Every structure is written in structure tokens, then in C-alpha cells.
Image (spheres, grey):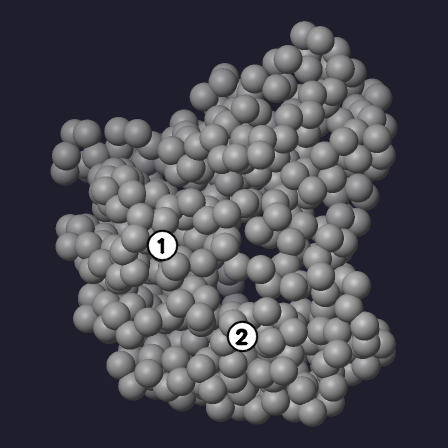
Amino acid sequence: MNVHDSERLSGLLEDAGYARAAEDTTADIVVFNTCAVRENADNRLYGNLGHLRPVKDANPGMQIAVGGCLAQKDRGEIVRRAPWVDVVFGTHNIGSLPTLLERARVQREAQVEIAEALEHFPSTLPSRRESAYAAWVSISVGCNNTCTFCIVPALRGKEKDRRPGDVLAEVRALVEEGVTEVTLLGQNVNAYGSEFGDRQAFSKLLRACGEIEGLERVRFTSPHPRDFTDDVIEAMAETPNVMPQLHMPLQSGSSKVLKDMRRSYRQERFLGIVEKVRAAMPQAAITTDIIVGFPGETEEDFEQTLHVVRESRFSMAFTFQYSKRPGTPAATMDDQVPPEVVKERYQRLVELQDQISWEENQKLVGREVELMVSEGEGKKDGAHRRLSGRAPDNRLVHFAVGDSEPRPGDMVTVEVTYAAPHHLVADSGVRNLRRTRAGDAWDARQGKPVQISKPDVLLGMPKIGAPAEEPAPVGGCCDA
């Protein structure tokens, strides 16, 4: 979600006449797009602002802006702790950034504007996408859940759904620009439609995406187990361009802890969804989020989490040590777990998941997979020059290029020759290379000659100020 917002902030600035600063120059404007999920995000923001103070002192015309969830939460606190910040804006009014920067410049004082309600869906704002072939599409913002560890609903508000026609229109426009993969975004995507009264709106949206010519891959994140219904599983299994990948947060395998988290499902419900997904899509890769050390978690509770991890056979898990967030009910709960216990449990979980990830990846050795080539420079490894790509199930594969010259967005077929816990290797060469319009669009962004079949295929593409592999001018503070 924050990456998507950052692309919109970049697009807004470019529309206002700004260009990306070169690496060896001092930027006129630095924007921090922040997260508030974990405490480390706060520390990183104020640390980065401290490092920038002498830079700004030496360059008085420089402006610093802070937006996102932490800005929504801390509001005036940011300017109090870092008075050299020029603009603070919240999650609901990212479209105001250019105006606030100009106002701060003219009035010579900090501007703090925190809207309490959404002004624009992020996807309706201009964008400077970092990828020529893949794009985020926001279908909803906000969240109606009240998880006791999470501050997001307080900062992003209640769920607001876009109309299906608006979502599909944006997807079609992106495909016309050369995009071949979209990821549908929402704090809780499978609750989509609750605002306009259609409980099957999300499965219908997935099927509608399947009818868009030229759209090769559809992904989504993140669903909530409470709202995961059979019609969504059926739509995933029956729509060819919806990828066999599911990221579904578990958070804890203990039904007692899930109740304390106010997660509104229990262990049996989660494992039941996993079983149904595997039955419908045996090749699906399932990933998850897990929190270790939630207040009141006992050793027995933690063993239940390990049990679910063993049963679910996740291809990967994002694992976190519980972090207190002021303003959440969990922050004041009794029985906070000692840090040394949390750390020890966390290490055991990571070791188990790494072993499972490795075992699941080893099953793919010898199989052919079709990859969408990722952006980034190739790397030499021994006798092989390698690029990277994503399999349909989103596994990362490093493959030997051989004599082929695939571009980001092109499709290659390779045979997996080696498995590691977090990636696969294919060193037997490219079996098949399919050049795509997405690859053409990438060439166009690099200024390379390219044959375009339709004269208007690149209309609406973001303005480009630097090669795509350079660091983005807008950074996120989120490590969750």
C-alpha cells in the first residue's frame, strides 16, 4: 500500500514540474512516506530526519515533507521534534503535497495538514511507476477490523470501496500502456463489496480481470481469513490469469491468542481454508504473516503456531516479534512476554519455516516454470550470467541467460536446477523466450528503439526523469 502511495507522490511531483534528483546531487525536496505498524519505523524516521538537518542547514532552499501513517498518528509531534520539516501530511490527503510545499515556501513556515477522510483513491492520482510491466491497483482503502495489535484502522479509516467499473477501467488503461501484471490492493481485499452490498464482488472482480486481453497475471493482497469464501477460491482456480499464489495472514496458530488479537477466526478455520485452496490449486504457493510474543502467549500457544506452520507448509512467512504500538488495546494488556522469550521463540519459528521453505522449493527441482523477467542488472555467477524472474506462484528464480536477451516483462521458460530456502536457480539456459509488449514498454522507458504495434500504446505513461533502476525519490519507512 505504501509503495503504491509513493508512486503516486512521485507522479504528483513530476506533474508539478519536479524531476528526480541525480544520486550525486543534493535534492531540493525529500519526501518520507511512513508506516506506523512497528516501533522501528518511528526510530528510522527521526534518525533520517536528524541526518538531514545539517544538509538542510547548508541548503536553506531544501524542503522536507513527511507523510503516511506515522504523520497521521503523530501530526504536530513531527514538527515539534524536527522543526526543520516543512510539510506534514496524512494518509488521506497525499494529493495535497505539491500545494503544501508551495505554501510552505511562500509563507516560510511549516504546513501540517491531516485530513480526517479520504480525498481521492490513490489510483486516481498521477503515478510514476517503478516498473514498466507491473502495477498496483487499489480496490479499497481503510479497514473495518479492530485487531488489538494494529493501529492501521485508526490511521487509514473505515473501508472505502471503489466501484468495479473504475477498477477495471484502470486495469485496461494500464494494459494499454504495456502492463501485463497487476496486483489488486486493499487492507482486506476479500471484504471488497461490503460497502455497496455485494458479498461476491471480489470473486466477480477476479473473473472480470480474466477477460481483459493482454493481462497475463493478476495477484492480490491481502485477504483476511474471516472473509475468505468459496467463491473466491473457485474464481482463483478457474481464471487462468489469476496466479496460484495466496498471501493470507495467520498472525497466530493459537485460537486463544487469535481471540485476544480479535482476529475473528480460529485455527480450524484457517487450516480449513488452506485445505480448500490446496484441493482447488495443488500448485498454489501460500505465504503468511506471523507475530511472535503477543501479550499472554504461552509456550503452549506458541506450539500451536508451530503446528499450523507444519500443517500449512507455507512457501514463505513474514515473521515479526510483537511490537507495542501506543493507542492499541494490546499495548496495555497484562502478561507482556519478556523480550528474551520472544526472541527465542522467534528464532525457533524462523528455523522451522526456513526448513519447510527449503523442502517445498526442492520439490520444484527438475520442473519447467514460466517466469516474468524482473527488472535489475544481470549478475555473473561463475560461468553463468543470470537474471531474475517470478514464477506464477511468485517464487523468485535466478536463471542463466545464455544467448537469449530477455527484457524485464518478457516471459521465459526455464528448468529449475537448484533450490535454496528463499529462491530457486535455473542454470540450464532459457528453453523459450516470449517477447512481450511489457518488454517493449520497458525498452521505451530506457530510450531504446522499439516497434510499437499501436501508435497510442504508450499514451498515459508516467514521465521519466531517470533510469528505472535508480533509487526512488520517495522512500518508505516500513519494515513490516
Question: Does residue 23 appear in this view?
Answer: no
Which residue carries the number 1 mark? 194
Name the image quarter holding residue 240: bottom left
The picture places residue 346, in percent across and down from the top left corner, at 71, 79
Labelled pair 2, 1 in contact (Cβ < 8 Å): no
Name the image quarter holding residue 476: top right
At numbered mark 1, what does the secondary structure look like: helix, strand or loop? Answer: loop
Neighbours of disc 2 within 10 Å: few (<14), some (14-19), many (20+): many
Q: Residue at x 49, y 18 (%)?
A: 16
Q: Residue at x 79, y 49 (%)?
A: 43
Q: Disc count in the image? A: 2
Q: Nearer the viewer, residue 313 or 235?
A: 235
Which image quadrant: the C terminus?
bottom right
Q: Would you say 157 lies left or right of 449 here?
A: right
Q: Residue at x 50, y 27 (%)?
A: 95
Residue 408 vertical placement versus 382 (above, below) = above
Q: Nearer the viewer, residue 473 or 380?
A: 473
The picture places residue 277, in percent across and down from the top left corner, at 33, 79
Give the Cα separation between the discs numbered 2 and 1: 22 Å
The amino acid marked with disc number 1 is Ser
Residue 116 vertical placement versus 308 (above, below) = above
The picture places residue 341, in percent across and down from the top left corner, at 81, 81
Neighbours of disc 1 within 10 Å: few (<14), some (14-19), many (20+): some
Residue 228 vertical placement versus 5 (above, below) = below
Q: Nearer the viewer, residue 294 or 342?
A: 294
The amino acid marked with disc number 2 is Leu
Which residue carries the number 2 mark? 250
